[in-house]
Amino acid sequence: MAVNLPPPDPARLLRVPGFELGVAKAGIRKPNRRDLLVMRLARGATAAAVFTRNRFCAAPVILAKRHLGGNVRALIVNTGNANAGTGRDGLRRALQVCESLAARLGCRTQEVLPFSTGVIMEMLPVERICAGLPRAVGNLREDNWADAAEAIMTTDTVAKAASRRVRLSGGIAVVTGIAKGAGMIRPDMATMLAFIATDARVGRRELRRITHQAADGSFNAITVDGDTSTNDAFVCLASGRGPEARSRKDLDALGAAIADVAQRLAQAVVRDGEGATKFVTIRVERGRSEAECRKVAYAIAHSPLVKTAFFASDPNLGRILAAIGNSGVPALDTDKVALYMDQVRVAKGGGRDPRYREEQGLAVMQKPEFTVRAVLNRGRGSATVWTCDLSFDYVKINAEYRT
Amino acid sequence: MAVNLPPPDPARLLRVPGFELGVAKAGIRKPNRRDLLVMRLARGATAAAVFTRNRFCAAPVILAKRHLGGNVRALIVNTGNANAGTGRDGLRRALQVCESLAARLGCRTQEVLPFSTGVIMEMLPVERICAGLPRAVGNLREDNWADAAEAIMTTDTVAKAASRRVRLSGGIAVVTGIAKGAGMIRPDMATMLAFIATDARVGRRELRRITHQAADGSFNAITVDGDTSTNDAFVCLASGRGPEARSRKDLDALGAAIADVAQRLAQAVVRDGEGATKFVTIRVERGRSEAECRKVAYAIAHSPLVKTAFFASDPNLGRILAAIGNSGVPALDTDKVALYMDQVRVAKGGGRDPRYREEQGLAVMQKPEFTVRAVLNRGRGSATVWTCDLSFDYVKINAEYRT
C-alpha cells in the first residue's frame, strides 16, 4: 500500500554546515530498530518552531516550548513512546533526558529540545533512552541525515527527507529537512515531527515568520484521518555558518526554499498515510476567503464516506457534494457550486452536469493520484489540502498498532 | 456484525388511530424489495419536523419544509435514490411524485410531504415511483408499521421501530415510531429518516417544541461516521383521534413518551451502524456547559483512532485523551481531567491513574457495550452521545455501496 514516491537517495541529501546527527537503537519499544536521534547544533544557531494545539500536548512539547526561548544546542528525539497524557511524572522524565544529554555534550539542560512520538499514556523509559545516548552521541556526523530520517519513523513505511540549495546574495545556502508521520495526521498550526535545517544566517524573528508561512502551506494543509497528535512539532533551525539572509529578496528566497522542502515532506507524510492507496489533492476555489476554502477542503478530506469512495475508485461523487454541504460555510449557495475531478466537470448548478458520464469519473478515480476541485463561485479565496483514502489497511494498522 | 437488539415484534407495534400505512416494491434501485412507503393521515392531524442542516439538502427536504406550513394529509418515502445534488430538475421530480399521490388520495399536492433516501446525485425515477403508488395505496392499513419500517431500510440490517403508551388526563395515548439509517449518520438538528406518530390531540406549537426536545436527546446525540446526510428528517405527527394533551402535565408526559421512542430509535440506528461491532455510550460530565460536553463527546466519537481501538478491543486509551485535547474546548485544564471505562478509572490528573491496570481496560473493551466517561471538573454541564466502532466492514460496506 501507500502512494510513496521513491525513498530519498542518501547520497542526494545535502549536509548542512553546523548540524551533526547521531542515531542509536535504544530498545525503547521494540528491540533492534533505530529509535533515538540526537542532533547537535553549532553555537549561535537560531531556532523557530510550531507545535500541536492539542490541549493534551505531550510533556516534551511543553519543555521544548520553554527551552526554545534561549539558545538551542541540541535536539533529542525518541520514537516508541509519546510521553503524552503522563502528567507531572512525564515532565520530570523529559527533563531527565535533557539533563543527561546536556551533561554528555557539555551544554546546559535548557539548551536541549526534547521530542517524543509513539504510544500515548505510557511512562517514558528514561533509563533505556539515557543508556542509548553514548552510542547516538558517538556517531554524530554531518552526513547522517538518511539515518536520522529512519530513526524517527513509527508506522511510516518509508523515511521522509528532502534537500535543496538556494542562492542568496552572499552565496549558496543549503536546506535539508526530515519528517515522520503516517497516522494521527491533521496538524493544527504544526505537524507530526519535522525538522528543517539550513546553514543560512537569519534572525530569529525572520526565521519564525518563515516557519509559520512554511507550516501553512505544508503541514497545515494535510490530513490523513483528522486526528491531531499530542506531539506535533515542526522545527526550523539555522546554523548561520553559510551566507546571510537579510535583504527582503534573500529572506523571500530562503523562505521559499524552506516552504518547498516543508511541502515535499508534508506530501510525503500523506503519501505514506496509514493504508493509503490514493494521493488526492483537494483544491477549493473562488470562496469568500482562504479560510472558508480550507474549511470546505477539510470537510471533503475528512469525510469517511468520501475517503472510502476514493479507496473503491467509486465515482459516488454525490458524497463530495454532501461533504461540501456539511462544511459549515455560512449561506453557501449550492446552486453556484461546480465540481471537477481532474479536468472532468461532474456537477454544476447544484446538480450533476448533464454532459458528465460516469465512465469519465471512474477513469479519474482509478488513478493513484488525482485532484478534486470544487469551485464555490462567491469570491476570490482559494486553498489546497492533500489527503489520502480510507482503506481496510487503515483499520488494520490502527486496530493492531500496539500488538 | 452490528450490535442490534432483537428486531421489533410486529405484534407489539401499536396501531395509532388516524394513521394508515401502505408499502410497495417499485424497483427504484433494486428489484423485488420494498422501497416505497405511503402514510395517510386523518384530516386535522398536526405535524412538526426537523431537517438536515446540510446546505446540499435534498429536493424532497426543500419541498417537505415548504409543505409543512399547511395541512398534512400524506407522507411518501422512497429508498434507493436520495434526490439530492439534483438541482431544479430534482425539485420538479419530487413535486411530480407529490402530485401523483395527491391525485390518488384526493387531497392537495401541498398536503403531501415527500422523503427520499439512497444514492446522491442521480435522477429520481419518477415513473417507477408513480407506477408503484397504486399498490402502496391499495394496502393502506393501520397495522402496517412493521412493513413500513422495513420499506424505508437502505444499508440497515434490521428494521427499526418502537411503540409505547402514555397516560394523559383524558385517557391513554399511543406513540409509535420508525426510523432508518446506518451510515452517513451524524444528524445535525435532525436525523436520517424517522417518523413518530401519536393519536394524542396536541397543538402545532407544542408538537414543534416536543419534536425539537426529542431530537436533542436522541437523533442529535448519535454518530456513526460524522457525515451528515443530505436527506435527514425527523417528523412527529399527531392525529388528534385520541386524548388531548393540553395541561403542562399532559404535555410533559406526551413529550417524554415521544422522546423515549425517539431515543430508542436513535440508539437502534447506532447499533446497526455500518460495520458496527460495539455500541458505545460517551458520557462527558462537569463541563462548563452542555454544549462543551457535547463537543468533547463528539470529538471522542469521531476520532478514527479511538473507533479503531474500540473495534480491536485495544485499551489504547491515550487516544481518548488525545481526542479530548483536540475537541477545541477553550482553556481546558488537562490536569483536572479524569477518564473512566465503565467503572474503571483509567486517568486522573492529566495522566494514567497509577492504580489502573491494563487488564481492567481490556475487560471493559471486550464487551459489546460499554461507557466511556470523561469528567472535566470545571462546571456542571453534561452530555451523552452514542456511537459505534470503525471496523473493516465499515470500509467494505462503503467501498461497495453502489455495486
Image (cartoon, coloured by chain):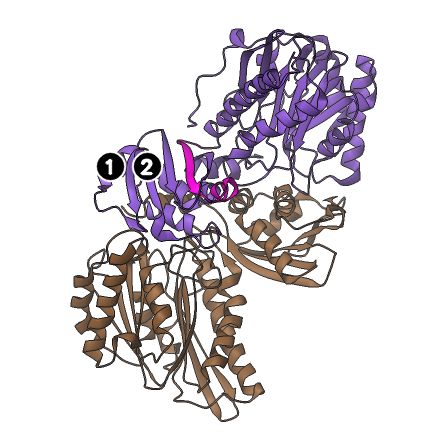
Chain colours: A purple, B brown
Whole-percent x, y for residue B210 in the image: 51, 76
Q: Quadrant of residue A216?
A: top right
Number of marks in the rendered image: 2
Tell me if residue B90 is in the magenta stretch.
no
**Magenta part of the protein: which range?**
A275-295
Residue closer to the observer: A11 or A28: A11
In what element is the residue under mark 1?
helix
In what element is the residue under mark 2?
strand
Q: Residue at x 58, y 86 (%)?
A: B249
Residue labelled with disc 1: A360
Q: Quadrant of residue A2?
A: top left
Q: How far apart are the alpha carbons under marks 1 and 2?
A: 9 Å
What is the residue that sits farthest to the front in this orientation?
A248
Check disc 1: other Cα within 10 Å, few if <14, some if 14-19, many if 20+.
some
Q: Quadrant of residue A252?
A: top right
Callout 1 and callout 2 share a chain: yes
Cβ atoms under marks 1 and 2 closer than 8 Å: yes
Q: Amino acid at mark 1?
A: Gln
Q: Is residue B387 visible?
A: yes
Q: Chain of mark 2?
A: A
Whole-percent x, y for residue A188 in the image: 59, 38
Q: Is residue B89 above or below residue A152?
A: below
Mark 1 or mark 2: name the one nearer the start of the chain: 2
Question: Is B235 placed left or right of A43 in the picture?
Answer: left
Q: Is residue B138 visible?
A: no
Q: Residue at x 47, y 53 (%)?
A: B224
Question: Is B401 placed left or right of B161 in the picture?
Answer: left
Tell me if residue A280 is in the magenta stretch.
yes
Residue labelled with disc 2: A341
Residue closer to the observer: A108 or A272: A108
Q: Amino acid at mark 2?
A: Met
Q: Residue at x 54, y 12 (%)?
A: A164
